[in-house]
Image (tube, coloured by chain):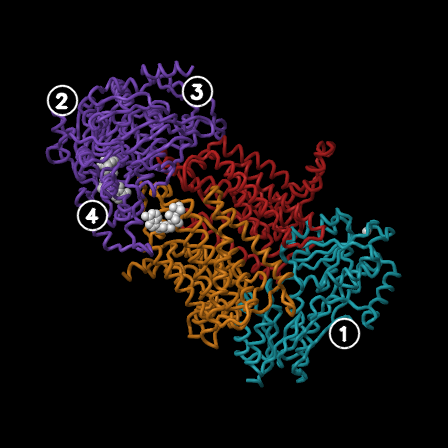
Amino acid sequence: MEMIINTQKLTKQFGDFFANKDIDLEIYKGDFHALVGENGAGKTTLMNMLYGLYTPSFGKIFIKGKEINIKNPKDAIKHGIGMVHQHFKLVESLSIFENIFLGNEITKNKMFINFEKEKKLVQNLIDEYGYSFSADTKIKDLSVGEKQKVEILKILYQNAEILILDEPTAVLTPQEVIELLNNLKKLQKKGKTIIIITHKLNEVKDFSDNITVLRKGKIVGKAKTSEVSIEDIAKMMVGREVILKVDKVKSEIGENIYSIENVSLKNKTRSLLENINIQVKKGEIVGIAGVEGNGQTELLGILSGIIKCSNGKITFKNKEITCEDPRKIRNHKIGIIPEDRYVDGLCSDMPIYKNMIAGYHYSYSSPKLHIFNWNDIKKHCETLKEKFDIRTNSIEDNVSCLSGGNAQKIIIARELSQNPELLIVSQPTRGVDVGSIEFIHSEIMNCKKKGMGILLFSSELSEIMNLSDRIIVMYKGKIIGELNSKEATKEKIGLMMSGLSEEVNHNDEKNI
Amino acid sequence: DEKDGIKVAMITSQGGLGDKSWNDSGYQGLVKAKEGMDIETKVIEPKDAAEGEKFLNDLAQAGYDLIITMEYAHGDVLKEVAPKYKDTHFAIFNQVVDVPNVVSVVFGEHEGSFLAGALAALMTTDTSISRINSDKKIGFIGGIQSPGIDKFLVGYREGAKYIDKDIQVVVGYANSFGDPNKGKEIASSQINNGVDIIYSVAGGTGIGVFEEAENKNVYAIGVDTDQDYLKPGTILTSMLKRVDLSIYEIIKQLVDGKLQNNTVMTPALAQKGVSLTEMKYTKDDIPAKYLERLEEIKQDIINNKIKVTDITAK
Amino acid sequence: MMKKIFKFNIMKFIIPILLAFLVGSIILLISNINPISAFYNLFIGAFGSGRAFLSTLYYATPLILTGTATAIAFKANLFYMGVEGALYIGGFCSSLAGIYFHGLPPYIHIPIALLIGMITGGLFAMIPGILKGILDVNEMVTSIMLNYVAILGTTYLASFPFKAKDAGFSATEMVEKSAVIPKIFDSSMVHYGLFLSLIFAILIYIMFKKSTFGYDIESMGKNVNFSESCGMQTAKKTIYIITLSGALGGLAGAMEVLGTYKRFIAGFSSGLGWDGLTISLLSNNNPIGVIFSSIFFGGLYSGGAQMELLADVPRTIISVIQGLIIFFLAVDFTVKRFKKIKSR
Amino acid sequence: MEILHTAIRVTTPIALAALGGLFTHKAGVLNIALEGMMLMAAFMGVVTSYFTGSPLLAIMAAFGVSLIIGLIFSFFGITLKGNFIIVGLAVNMTAYGITAFWLQQWFGIRGILSSDKIIGLDPIDVPILNKIPIISDIFNNHTPIVYVSFLLLLITYITLKHTKIGLHIRVVGENENAAKAVGIKVNKIRYISVLLSSLYCALAGVNLSLESLNLFVEKMTAERGFIALAAIFSGKGTALGTYLFSFIFGLGETFQISLQIFDVPGSLIQTIPFIFVIIILTFIGIKNKKNKIKRGITND
Ligand SMILES: Nc1ncnc2c1ncn2[C@@H]1O[C@H](COP(=O)(O)OP(=O)(O)OP(=O)(O)O)[C@@H](O)[C@H]1O
Ligand SMILES: Nc1ncnc2c1ncn2[C@@H]1O[C@H](COP(=O)(O)OP(=O)(O)OP(=O)(O)O)[C@@H](O)[C@H]1O
Ligand SMILES: [Mg+2]
Ligand SMILES: [Mg+2]
């Protein structure tokens, strides 16, 4: 088989730190290649070098056996490399077709953009791949999954032969994941080469042909997928045995501590949430499932105090806390782990130790003058760092230096160290490696054991099913149904998530 | 070092040289003195009024014999600085600073402006003059509204009312002494309102007033220096404030050894400290009877038959 | 510890100054002025003698406050540019306190007048603060607009209702003797307000480093969404921050009025607020940096005056050279300019 | 009608600077140097007209000097990554100084350069327009650059919305990384946007010095550059909004000037345009507030 892309001793150094060292990557034409490794192993760095976003410190890149020099993304595109980034590189205010043609516009008289033609071409492409959106939708109106599709369309349009996807499935719903991977398979059949980075090992097992494993910037293993098991891959990555599925712990389910009653939210044009009613008991994990964009973000916003609801009532331990701001909510001993860790959860440009006290910083300061004793705080943070196994040189580094998994652990450490009585968690393991998932899941289980009430938002069905005692499914801003963990199956939940529920049909009839 | 020649320094007011009026006029006096007498001169343009105190001290210490400050706001400072340098003379304008070695010069701008107002009033309804309409309206445009500027306005208004009680003086301010575009717009607005003679007391802003007066074929009146030449025929006259003469005079007294302590100079009409120009370009537009009338008024003011209000007087 | 405070290393200042002098020299040569004598006088006038240095400190005194004021807002990523306006309001109101309170001893009169300057400056700043905090109206626009309103308004007040009877210009009466901030030395204009400026800069520095409010400011400057999610109540904090910034601006105005002019004079500030803005940016919004940058600016002004006095350099060229120096200071020549593209 | 005619005249320099500044605003460059660019252009225009008597050459010279300032601003701000605000303030400070200095060096005068040798641009009586009743009172008899400014409003709108370069300018400002990822040269686009703003400012400067008047006065731009910036932000970065807010300033200013005819204290009346803008922004803020569901402030 022909080698389409390979590297020799490819190395990337940031200061004294080797993000990649002596990488000899080998990828065959038509391969469906999975690149796996812990958070911070250097996967993104390696791909960014192939795509011309980073200049290698050392080493060579070959395409079809020919050494090439990739100075910028344009060069990469020229050589048939396309990349979908971990953080999308789309311009929110522009439409889909404008994004796809960005940098490569079709013009009249070399000046005016031929919007009509661009739109038509893109619409054809969209139809060809059977997507449901229209070419002139603005990116800001798309769901994450749809944005992903736009990114893929973008590189397909560039006629890429090699498609690099950096954690494409992290933000997708199960259906979307299947759809994406099947699409990629189709592309593979058309002769494209796929390189995919993912932390979800079942995807690796089910779809890839070959695997390369990175650890601490070096290749620690290469394998044919068919010859290894998921456990083997996990072990290669982490360097030890990993428990992939935490066992549900039995805990005393106590009295009701948190109830959401008839919560609704409207914006100027439409209703975003309608009559949400949820109760959480002590020692209980309630999972909220649903396709992204069905009101979970808004509900989480209300519960964590950054959105004021239009109607309804929220009580915690029989005290009404509706519309309180995040500070007060936290003061009631409610821990919040927000959905987007780099937007709401962390401040990337602040040191780790300052992030570790955020939201509780008032209580770390002296009572009268509100002055910090940073030395004490740093000591405290050191212990948190040890306890939660946050891998970093120094807690004085900025969060931006950390990998996703370690960044997430900061939030978890911060919220759990306050011993909350209720934990509101959203997407706790998005983009996090298997080792860290194991850790985070077991931490959540510990909380349950201690009698905390937990409300878990996740787009990861397996996560919801593994952890929750009850599962609530949201659809179009409403609760479409609730399942007991025993009766829940992937299929049942999946159906409800797509809006197909007897209850809903029932309700709709009533409404008419 | 007293012996090696007399050294004279001038500190400009905010706005500095190039204002085509106040500071420039003082500078002319200095230049003229330098030409005629054996003196050394220096001009300082401070960043702001506060820097003045520093310069007053620095210049005195550098051995200047006479330090003239054009900045009104230096009055306070001078009260503190001047007593420290008894051998140095200082000069200040527009106020009386009661320190022996300070020469205070207070111009009678109100008197000159009275004449300007009277002339404007005489002209504004005489439709036999081609640029004049029948409205009894004349204009006044000031730089930044302040008592110093309103001293001109009040004299001007009184002069106009002296001729005809019904004359309306339309007033405008540009909030700047250096925004000619705004001067132009204000003038334009006044002219549209029926004004046909505009007295501009606004430094560089006034240049825009003249420009618009020329465009719209009406008259303007300049100020401080002889600005008639800027728009010959359009600028009816300028209200001269002979800062140059006073400065020359002070320096001359100093050189002649006649400069006395506690000098207060009040150059007004009588002292020829203020006056209207000879109207080189516009004489023929103005009916002779008006010029005669103006001369009478001038004499009346000098003889104290007409009292003009000085709003800055205590 | 020291190293951390003086994060900006000395080369960061020297390279731009040398470059500015190089370009400045060319301009001076073209205009037939000896650059060596000009720059010699600039330096001597700024730092060459005790007297010169005191004069430099005199110029630096209000700049330290306006610089710190700007730093507070800018650090929180709030583009409040209204320090100049607050300076006028504070200056004017403190002058009234200086004039109309009689019979107070200096140790009461001065603090009261200064406090009134601070409070009124702060209240004035609260307008853009509230508009931003509550209605999300762009603070840069409103604060620039209000600067004009402040300058025009105080000019009116000082020209008419509160004009001094004996002044031939727009100014209030002199403040009572008991309200005048005394000079430190008889021979120089620098007054005790200098220490107040330094104290405030240091206090704000400590606030930035040590207090919860400083923490909130830092995090708002870096990520507002995060700050809101952490319960910092960004709307309310925005109002506090802008008000505090305006209060320091008001204090600067009050100090100018009580220490330098001893009365309010219409249009007295030759852009102290704007210089403060430049200074704050040059110092990376760090109050300790602001102190040093302010002294540097003070030197530039003091030396500029000396250049004018002794080297016969016209004022016009001095502002060109001062502009050039700021040009080069804007650039960090010590940073190695390698091509690096951040992935996030 | 007269008021509107004047308002358009007063608006023109502000609107031109603002529309130019819009390009930089969109490209993520805070261009405080608008003021300095205008001033230098006003100066060079007058000087060139003085020596050549040709308004056309004067405009060319204004373009030239403004572009040079734009290049210097870009070099320090974009290439050397200096802080845009500081670089912009430095440009303004240097421009104030250097125009005064050249006046002194070349003409031996300070303050004002005024002469019969300076030929300006005169108002145009537009053929068909002058026949339409009310419209002609407002729109006829303006100077050429006023008409050019209308044209530029349209061109700016179209450029930003419909052309490749306009799209790239917007993208660079909104999401630099996205631009880089598709190979758009971010610095190049920023240079272009600054130079475009230079061209607009050149026209604004010429309008001030050779259309309204035939002269140059030190600092004659009188902070119109800052007003222009305010117009851009108030107009939420759209071409129409920017022009509209420039016009609101112009109208407020005209209104203020007309009101001075009555005897109200001048300094107070002069605050009208500024207070006017704040009030309008407040109303917009109140309206937006109703549609906002999230707590806290946003950073724009
Ligand atoms: N621009 C940079 N400057 C300095 N260090 C960097 C930079 N980019 C990445 N790193 C470091 O290089 C290491 C590898 O990062 P990389 O993003 O490639 O990890 P990854 O394998 O993609 O992790 P994840 O699974 O969390 O995405 C990390 O330790 C990271 O902190
Ligand atoms: N546990 C705490 N919770 C909230 N604020 C605190 C706490 N401890 C200290 N503070 C401090 O109180 C300061 C004053 O804040 P603020 O005026 O918002 O308090 P508040 O009176 O509780 O406000 P509110 O009326 O909105 O509840 C804050 O800046 C913060 O530093
Ligand atoms: Mg990665
Ligand atoms: Mg008349």
Alpha carbons under labels 4 and 3: distance apart: 52 Å
Instruction: Supply the letter of whichever chain is red.
Output: D
Please state the horizontal and vertical placement of residue A361, each as a whole percent of the image. 30, 48
Q: Which chain is cyan?
A: B
Residue underneath mark 2: A226
- Nearest the viewer among A488 and B313 is A488
Distance, label 4 to label 2, CA atoms, is 37 Å
Q: Rate crowding at label 1 as few (under 14), some (14 to 19) or many (20 or more) other CA atoms within 10 Å.
A: few
Chain under numbered label 3: A
Q: Residues within 10 Å of mark 3 (few under 14, many from 20)?
A: some
Task: Give the residue at x 34% y 60%.
Answer: C11
Q: Which residue is mark 4?
A: A393
Q: CA distance from mark 1 to mark 4?
A: 86 Å
Residue that mark 3 sits on: A120
Q: Secondary structure at mark 2?
A: helix
Residue under circle 1? B271
Q: Is residue D90 above or below residue A385?
A: below
Quick one: label 2, few (<14), some, or many (20+) residues within 10 Å? few
> Disc 2 and disc 1: Cα gap in Å?
113 Å
Q: Residue type at mark 4: give it.
A: Asn
